[in-house]
Amino acid sequence: MTRRVSSGAPWESVVGYSRAVAAGDHVYVTGCTSQDRGTVLHVGDPYEQTRQAIRNVEAALAELGAALTDVVRTRIYVTDISRWQDYGRGHGDAFGAVMPATTMVEVSALIDPDMLVEVEAVAYKPGIGE
Protein backbone atom coordinates (compact mmCIF):
# COMPACT_ATOMS: atom_id res chain seq x y z
CA MET A 1 0.00 0.00 0.00
CA THR A 2 1.16 3.54 -0.74
CA ARG A 3 -0.08 6.68 1.01
CA ARG A 4 0.22 10.20 -0.41
CA VAL A 5 -0.30 13.76 0.87
CA SER A 6 -0.56 17.09 -0.90
CA SER A 7 0.48 20.54 0.31
CA GLY A 8 -1.88 22.40 -2.01
CA ALA A 9 1.00 24.12 -3.81
CA PRO A 10 -0.12 25.26 -7.27
CA TRP A 11 2.62 23.28 -9.01
CA GLU A 12 1.51 19.86 -7.73
CA SER A 13 -1.48 19.48 -10.04
CA VAL A 14 0.32 20.98 -13.04
CA VAL A 15 3.40 18.78 -12.72
CA GLY A 16 1.57 15.76 -11.28
CA TYR A 17 3.29 14.99 -8.00
CA SER A 18 2.56 14.53 -4.30
CA ARG A 19 4.17 16.48 -1.46
CA ALA A 20 5.08 13.17 0.18
CA VAL A 21 4.63 9.48 -0.49
CA ALA A 22 4.85 6.72 2.13
CA ALA A 23 5.79 3.39 0.58
CA GLY A 24 6.95 0.38 2.54
CA ASP A 25 9.20 1.59 5.34
CA HIS A 26 10.04 4.97 3.80
CA VAL A 27 8.54 8.42 3.28
CA TYR A 28 9.78 10.36 0.28
CA VAL A 29 9.23 14.10 0.61
CA THR A 30 9.33 16.17 -2.56
CA GLY A 31 11.62 19.18 -2.60
CA CYS A 32 10.12 21.86 -0.35
CA THR A 33 10.78 25.57 -0.61
CA SER A 34 10.01 28.56 1.55
CA GLN A 35 6.46 29.00 0.33
CA ASP A 36 2.90 28.77 1.49
CA ARG A 37 0.35 27.96 -1.23
CA GLY A 38 2.48 29.59 -3.90
CA THR A 39 3.58 32.66 -1.96
CA VAL A 40 7.33 32.81 -1.35
CA LEU A 41 8.24 33.59 2.27
CA HIS A 42 11.45 35.17 3.62
CA VAL A 43 12.50 36.66 0.28
CA GLY A 44 16.26 37.26 0.13
CA ASP A 45 17.07 35.36 3.36
CA PRO A 46 18.71 31.96 2.71
CA TYR A 47 18.77 30.97 6.40
CA GLU A 48 15.07 31.63 7.01
CA GLN A 49 14.11 30.13 3.64
CA THR A 50 15.92 26.93 4.62
CA ARG A 51 14.18 26.84 7.99
CA GLN A 52 10.77 27.36 6.32
CA ALA A 53 11.48 24.71 3.69
CA ILE A 54 12.29 22.24 6.47
CA ARG A 55 9.12 23.22 8.36
CA ASN A 56 7.26 22.30 5.17
CA VAL A 57 9.09 18.96 5.07
CA GLU A 58 8.13 18.44 8.72
CA ALA A 59 4.46 19.17 8.01
CA ALA A 60 4.38 16.62 5.18
CA LEU A 61 6.04 14.00 7.37
CA ALA A 62 3.59 14.67 10.21
CA GLU A 63 0.60 14.10 7.93
CA LEU A 64 1.89 10.59 7.33
CA GLY A 65 2.86 9.88 10.95
CA ALA A 66 6.60 10.57 10.74
CA ALA A 67 8.89 13.27 12.14
CA LEU A 68 12.17 14.99 11.38
CA THR A 69 13.84 12.48 13.72
CA ASP A 70 12.94 9.76 11.19
CA VAL A 71 14.81 11.49 8.34
CA VAL A 72 17.79 9.54 7.01
CA ARG A 73 18.57 11.57 3.86
CA THR A 74 18.21 15.16 2.69
CA ARG A 75 19.18 16.98 -0.47
CA ILE A 76 19.58 20.75 -0.48
CA TYR A 77 19.39 22.59 -3.80
CA VAL A 78 20.64 26.17 -3.59
CA THR A 79 20.87 29.02 -6.07
CA ASP A 80 24.06 30.52 -4.58
CA ILE A 81 26.54 28.04 -3.12
CA SER A 82 28.67 30.90 -1.75
CA ARG A 83 25.97 31.25 0.94
CA TRP A 84 26.31 27.60 1.96
CA GLN A 85 26.82 28.50 5.61
CA ASP A 86 23.40 30.18 5.80
CA TYR A 87 21.67 27.18 4.23
CA GLY A 88 23.77 24.80 6.32
CA ARG A 89 22.93 26.61 9.57
CA GLY A 90 19.22 26.36 8.79
CA HIS A 91 19.61 22.65 8.06
CA GLY A 92 21.68 22.16 11.20
CA ASP A 93 19.03 23.82 13.36
CA ALA A 94 16.59 21.08 12.37
CA PHE A 95 18.90 18.10 11.87
CA GLY A 96 21.93 18.72 14.12
CA ALA A 97 20.96 15.87 16.45
CA VAL A 98 19.55 13.64 13.69
CA MET A 99 22.57 13.84 11.35
CA PRO A 100 21.00 12.46 8.15
CA ALA A 101 23.09 11.86 5.06
CA THR A 102 22.89 15.02 2.95
CA THR A 103 24.04 16.70 -0.22
CA MET A 104 24.07 20.40 -1.09
CA VAL A 105 24.12 21.26 -4.78
CA GLU A 106 24.03 24.62 -6.56
CA VAL A 107 21.39 24.90 -9.28
CA SER A 108 20.91 27.70 -11.80
CA ALA A 109 17.35 28.50 -10.68
CA LEU A 110 14.26 27.24 -8.89
CA ILE A 111 10.65 27.55 -10.07
CA ASP A 112 10.31 31.12 -8.71
CA PRO A 113 13.24 33.56 -8.84
CA ASP A 114 12.62 34.55 -5.17
CA MET A 115 13.25 30.95 -4.06
CA LEU A 116 16.82 30.44 -2.90
CA VAL A 117 16.68 26.87 -1.58
CA GLU A 118 14.76 23.62 -1.96
CA VAL A 119 15.04 20.73 0.50
CA GLU A 120 13.92 17.17 -0.11
CA ALA A 121 13.99 14.34 2.39
CA VAL A 122 13.69 10.60 2.86
CA ALA A 123 12.51 9.23 6.20
CA TYR A 124 12.63 5.66 7.50
CA LYS A 125 9.88 4.35 9.73
CA PRO A 126 9.02 0.63 9.59
CA GLY A 127 5.53 -0.04 8.22
CA ILE A 128 4.65 3.61 7.55
CA GLY A 129 3.46 2.94 4.01
CA GLU A 130 0.97 0.28 5.06
Image (cartoon, rainbow, N blue to C red):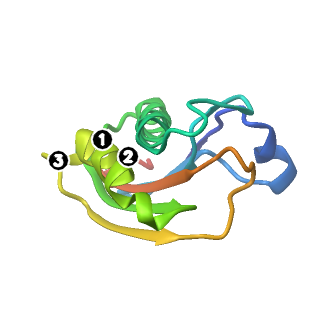
Residue 71: % across, % down? 30, 51
**Residue at the disc numbered 1:** 68
What's the amino acid at mark 2?
A: Ile
Marks 2 and 3, how far apart at CA: 24 Å
**SS for callout 3:** loop
Q: Give the left or right position of residue 78, taking residue 111 as reference.
A: left
Q: Residue at x 68, y 44 (%)?
A: 114
- Coordinates of residue 125 in the picture (x, y in percent): 29, 50
Please state which of the two labelled residues, at mark 2 or mark 1, is closer to the viewer: 1
Question: Which residue is tagged 2?
Answer: 128
User: Residues at badges 3 and 1 in contact (C-beta under 8 Å)?
Assistant: no
Q: Are marks 2 and 1 in contact (CB under 8 Å)?
A: no
Q: Earlier in the sequence, mark 2 or mark 1?
A: 1
| Label 3 vs 1, first from the N-terminus | 1
Q: Nearer the viewer, residue 122 or 118?
A: 118
Q: Nearer the viewer, mark 2 or mark 3?
A: 3
In percent of the image, x 44 and y 49: which residue is there? Answer: 129
Q: Name which residue type carries label 3.
A: Gly
- The answer to whether residue 30 is visible is no
Relative to 110, 106 lies left or right: left
Q: Residue 36: horizontal and vertical position, in percent? A: 65, 28
Residue occupying the far right of the picture: 14
**Above or below: residue 85 compared with residue 13:** below
Secondary structure beneath dot 1 equals: helix
